[in-house]
Image (cartoon, grey):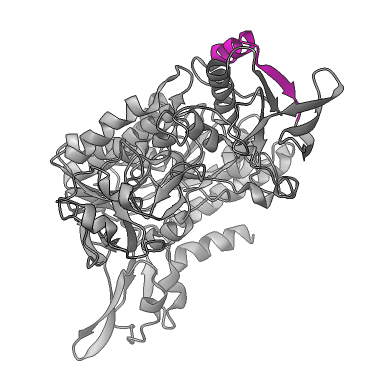
Amino acid sequence: MREVGELRIGVFICHCGLNIASVVDVGRVKEAISALPGVVVCEDYPYMCSEPGQELIVRRVREFNLNRLVVASCSPSMHEPTFREVARRAGLNPYLFEMANIREHCSWCHSHEPEKATEKAIDLVKMAVAKVRLLEPLEARKAPIERSALVLGGGIAGITAALDLAEAGIHVYLVERSPSIGGHMAQLDKTFPTLDCSACILTPKMVDVARHPNVELLTCSEVLEATRTEAGFKVKVLKRARYVDESKCTGCGICTEHCPIEVPSEFDAGLGPRKAIYIPFPQAVPKVAVIDQEHCIKCGLCRLACEAGAIDFNQEDRELELQVGAIIVATGMGLLDVGTLPELAAVRSPNVITHLQLERLLSSSGPTGGRVIRPSDGKEPRSVAIITCVGSRDERANPFCCRIGCSIAVKQAFLLKERLGPDTEVFICFMDLRAYGRGLEEFYARAREEGVKFIRGSPSDIEPLPDGSIRLTVFDQSTGKLLEVVADLVVLVVGLTPSPGFKDLASKLKMPVGPDGFALEAHPKLRPAETPTKGLFIAGCCQGPKDIVETTSHASAAAMKAASMLLRGYIVVEPFVASVDEERCRGCGRCEEVCEFGAIRLQERDGRLVARVNDVLCEGCGSCAVKCPTGAIRVHGFTREQILAQVGVAAG
């Protein structure tokens, strides 16, 4: 790397096409910055991140012997690594570089105030120049990691990620809190737009992941605690007792036949019963019974009936401690509780069901063997109304679109026509039909051809009638008419939420969560499967609502990112970490108290306590530096002097 002597600063301003240049007067910015002391070169270019733009920087560094760089362009989260690599190619230490964001912070947020946007851009670049004067050469280092991974969630996302990792030769722990893997996809009858059998796609994958030699399947399990270590993560997992020996159970189901207790089945969305000892569904993996201790009356009939001797009431919960290099969160989604919406909470009718309950009625393995009936009397409905956006795009519940609700409604309408006959009336009440994706527009057209009636409007009134049918009052925006629809069965396509317990899990993993409650990715476009924490990845609907195609694609992306890191055998530790001046440290321990990442520990040195920082665990948040009463802690790249220099420029 080039030795740092006299300050020779190069500033490069990007037009970003018209993203910046249409609002910010780049010429004025260039003129103002060129006059600053130490600035040897100040140039602008239409696309600084392009190959010609990068080569321009490399040439100017070598031509003018530059030893500091400032690039004024877009967000550092997008292109800071790009320009660090440019500095490295030019022979500079990559950390003698600073970036000023004049796109998101100026042109985009002040698009109607070009004068103010330009003044702000000048200030931001001046602040970057003030900081870059005080930067010191830093070096990243490599830290070895465990070559194993933990996948949280056994739905299609978790199964896909686990299989991809296992095929790459990585040992995987697949943790699922339910008695079987499969997730929501296992509850579906068919998938849109091809109407192929959900179980036919999913079941072979479930079997593959359970039999793979590199996958250790942990069902009835959940994370208790997770801490960062130098080698990755140390995770405590609670494996709840099944009270059935997994090595002995053959999945014959005789025990369930003899159990006298029946309760509503969670897998069948409450429409059918299950026993106190049960196998969740016929294709369950592992196909091992589990005893529900809350409802079991300890009669012992299951033990007497079990020829394999698998029933064990003495089983206890176990805590497992796993050391892994990466974690993929694939905890899926939940369904909005429609009882939170007053207009629906007041409608007390068994003939108003959710779309998931209809899936179970449609399924051949469901409570009715695939017959669609009214829950109130067991009769086949002759008219069905499907209402989309229930709790979605609604400020009282989910302000966001669930993305797959319209496609679900079209699929279920098509299946209802198929199962109940072409003369069955099927209505879809919708706000906007968003049948995006390959083949879905054609699927929607097919449903219309089959006689499905589409009404653009949400019901203003839902009233149960004495005969069990439901009367809906809907204003059809397409015709401008107020319609009255009487349906034997009403299906609510309810909004999607993060899975139950996700918020608590995110807290344990110290994973950021967005305002919608779903996991927040490191970058929505460039790093959609990663989180800001190294080694922690996200897959599927834990990041937001997705269909099966998007979910599996996202899961494979997360697995690829994790595998590329694990197979390399190390992570790169950025140098923006805290360091302690041990001569000034008095060992008070306040830094250790506020460190959320366990990166600081008090240790004895020459007969006194001093703070020591583990740079692998440190995230460079600066909490310790703020709390230190003696100023003994500094964060490289964000020192007190550097920040105050920027503040001084901003203050004028």
Q: Is residue 79 left or right of residue 28?
A: left
Residue 497 on image: x %, y % = 54, 46
User: Which one is nearer the viewer's eye here, 309 or 591?
Assistant: 309
The magenta segment: 441-457
Confirm whether the magenta stretch covers residue 196: no
Is the residue 437 above or below the residue 90 in the image? above
User: Which one is nearer the viewer's eye here, 623 or 484?
Assistant: 484
Confirm whether the magenta stretch covers residue 455: yes
Quarter location, residue 62:
top left
Instruction: Name the outermost residue toward the right.
Output: 481
Instruction: Name the outermost residue toward the top.
Output: 449
Please give the name of the residue rendered at 20% of the width and 45% of the height, measured from the top-left corner: 566
Residue 321 on image: x %, y % = 22, 63
Please give the name of the residue rendered at 44% of the width and 70% of the height, measured from the top-left corner: 623
User: Which one is nearer the viewer's eye here, 135 or 326?
Assistant: 326
Q: Is residue 535 visible?
A: no
Quadrant where the C terminus is found in the figure: bottom right
Residue 634 on image: x %, y % = 38, 70
Is the residue 581 above or below the residue 193 in the image? below
